[in-house]
Amino acid sequence: MNDVFPFVVVGLTAGSVYGIAGMGLVLTYKTSGIFNFAHGAVAAAAAYLFYELHVRSGLPWPVAAVISVIGFGAVAALCLERLARALRGVSLAMSIVATIGLLLAIQGVAVMRYGPRTLTMPAYLPTRSIRMVGVNVGLDQIITFLVALVAATGLYLFFRYSRMGVAMRGVVDDPDLLALNRVSPVRARRWAWFLGSSFAALSGVLIAPVLGLEAFVLTLLVVQAFGAAAIGRFSSLPLTYLGGLAVGVGASLSTKFVASVPSLRGLPSSFPFLVLFVTLLVLPRRLLVDSGAAVASPPPHTHSLPPRVARGGLVLGAGVALLVPWIVGARLPVYTNAVIYVLVFLSLRLLVRTSNQVSLAHAGFAAVGAAAFAHFTHAGLPWPLALLAAGLVGVPVGAVVAIPAIRMSGLYLAIATFGFGILLEQLIYPQSFMFGANGSLAVPRPHVSGVDLASDRGFYYVALTVAVLASVVVAWIHRSRLGRLLRGLADSPTALATHGADTKVTLVIVFCISAFLAALAGALFGALTGSIDGTPFGSFSSIYWLAILAVAGNGLIAPAFVAGIFIAVVPAYITNHTIIDLFPVMFGMSAIGNAIMSTRGSPFAGWLQGASIRSAGRADRSPVRDRMIIQEVAA
Amino acid sequence: MTAVVAPPTTDGLSVRGLSVRFGGLVAVDNLDLDAPEGRLTGLIGPNGAGKTTTFDACSGLNTPSDGSVHLFGNDVSRLGPPARAQRGLGRTFQRMELFNSLSVADNVALGREAAMAGSNVLRQIVASRHEQDEMMEAAAGAMELCGISDLADRRASALSTGQRRLVELARALAGRFRILLLDEPSSGLDHNETARFGDILERVMAERGVGLLLVEHDMSLVMRVCHHVYVLDFGKLIFEGSTDDIRDSEIVRAAYLGAEEV
């Protein structure tokens, strides 16, 4: 018992933090209908502010804490409530893009200001330890636990019994009804955002001394609240808190148990995502109904170019693409990289735009392809065959992701794929069957006697050929029966199913094709650099890719090329590091802007709009449901 | 009200002992209902009576707590929506479920194509030339029947409510359905459009001989086209009979029709 207890203490401390972070997330989601993927980033921002005030400016920690938690919470609440209001009527996919953009922007600012390295946050709470049940427990641990417990209980009581709390519960269901009762829905939502952001901020400030300050880690770790929120079924506050504790203790105990199994060393940090993924898989389907606003978005705006212009653009683009190796000199690998990214964006586009499914696990598909390709070429498979086989290895992985897609739509799918991506990164990437025992594998370029394919120039054409073939395939899919089914799926999966098409099959197909293309890209990335490891395929890459695609414009094929140039070529021509650091911020902000503008017919966006919120909202609109809501509010 | 429970009909849709609960609320309570081929059956009742819930249970979109759904004598209660559609049950939606980004012609064609795709991976990816022809023919016929052939190239989202209702009906008619559930097809239509809708329904009955089950608020339309009417209130069947019976029924008048002119 005594050798387990210390892990329980650590787990309870961390779990308390996850618990309150999760409660904040659930609270804002329940009241605004917007699931804030940037919740962890809000926590990180508060922790940095605390660091700035307490460590750099020397303010006493209680003052710094009050400012960072309550003051920052209030400011964040005003902004977030405004953002959430601007996102009303926007499709689910677009609202996900917006909060993901916010996450990127906050992280980007933190990196610009404090650099990518981890800053140590000195302990501000007393660290003296007390002997409890034969174990030394730090005072700071006890305080963290108690603060979280008080906050959680307070929030629960407030939500349950105060007038404003009741109003918050009513505001999602029926803002108009609430307004009739002389409670302003905006005020209720602002309160909810304030509490939610403050809880995020509190979790950030509490956990910073334990983890240190590093934008990515902090964002990711507070995102562990996702696991807690899933246990709370994204709606119950007490269950979310308990879920946080369970996740914390489970992760901590797993540290102890995997100590003897080195291959599982990624388990503790990915434990919450395992919980998240599994919970989403086992929760009854009826609980997985988005509580997002049921506003039908206007149809997507497509700006198809006149055929002659399109044809001209195609010829011009093809000409430029063919001439690139003779123009750009030593920067050629950068262009090859862009061409490979075209595959990633085509694959993402087929999924997100055509089919209105969100995947935040795309980097994982690419990683699997890269690793498989390295192994196949080492095993002596001819280069082109190895490439094809690497793509095919992506297919079952795509099918695995399609399982949550079959069970859940929209938001929950996005969350599940996010969890899946992190699981892959932390649990699978380190395995020797992925990138070898040293975490890195050599990857060859193709060799054909008499033809130069292995030089930078030759390989550029190889990559370009694959990208063009993929473009042709995607364009063909769009015109085929599958394309019609996918577009139908995006607009109304219900109608498709009630007319006889098995939409589960359709979903599996599109995920498999998408994973195939992404895996091809992963393989080519490896061949381009000559060796491959897990770094380029971090789970945040998936987020970044989605945000860039969101700002790359309309159309079917062209935006994939535009996005490829954005992500690979543009940074290579900017020597100023500040501007390069600014990139995630810019893409993040543009993603938010595009999401907001998507209902207003912006020339850029609109393609992500789809039917998912319509199908999700239907249950809320039936007369029966109306009656239930009225009873709930009246009670 | 209901007499002895009859065995499920073998020539259409039958619902037996159907109950659907949402939490503590009983939306549909022990309902028996038949919609055979060749008959235009009405299902009426005030808001929240459980009509759409019944439709959803028939097409497999919700999970009944009790009872069974039969199609042409086979129990389909355990099948999903696509499988029921494959067995001849089609429907429209009160909140229209059009493919908004597609043209009218593509919407209607998908009404046939969805069933061709079914659950077979290959058939979901490519259409044979033969299927393509069959699809186009079915779509053209359905659009003709609904009088929307001139809208074929318009985008579904760009149409008026009345036109959208017709597109949804045409899409269902393009499929090889033998029983169609129509959920408030006249809501959002003006008087003339509703009258024209009634004409179309009568044409469909005459030309196709399918079975229609119609949820409808417009009593004049119900009284004009329906052969047999079920009346629901608070999830319970309170009356069934011909339109004449309905007109004479005190129960129906009290529960639903109220002051409305019949």
Image (cartoon, rainbow, N blue to C red):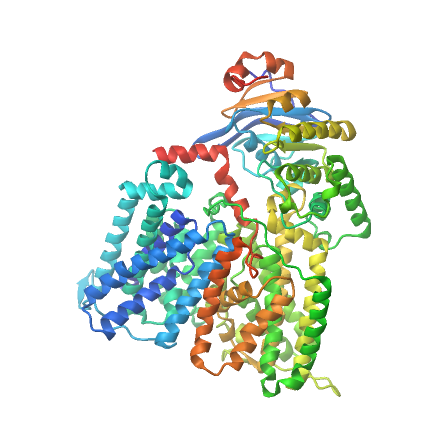
Residue pictured at 68% horizontal, 55% vertical: A483
The quarter holding residue A500 reads: top right
Q: Position of residue B126 (x, y in %)?
A: 74, 55
Camera sees residue B86: yes
Image height of A306 relative to A454, above or below: above
If the image is split into quadrants, where does the C terminus of chain A sit? top left
**Would residue A564 appear left or right of A384 to someone viewing this image?**
left
Residue pictured at 61% horizontal, 54% vertical: A507
Image height of B171 relative to A247, above or below: above
Image height of A45 relative to A183, above or below: below
Residue in front for this viewpoint, A289 or B256:
B256
Q: Position of residue A467 (x, y in %)?
A: 66, 71
Image height of A486 relative to B140, above or below: below
**Would residue A494 appear left or right of B172 to someone viewing this image?**
left
The quarter holding residue A371 reads: bottom right
Q: Where is residue A454 in the image (x, y as percent from the top left)?
A: 66, 85
Residue in front for this viewpoint, A246 or A611:
A611
If the image is split into quadrants, where does the N terminus of chain A sit? bottom left
Picture mark count: 0
Q: Where is residue B158 in the image (x, y as percent from the top left)?
A: 63, 46
Camera sees residue A5: no
Residue in front for this viewpoint, A441 or A331:
A331
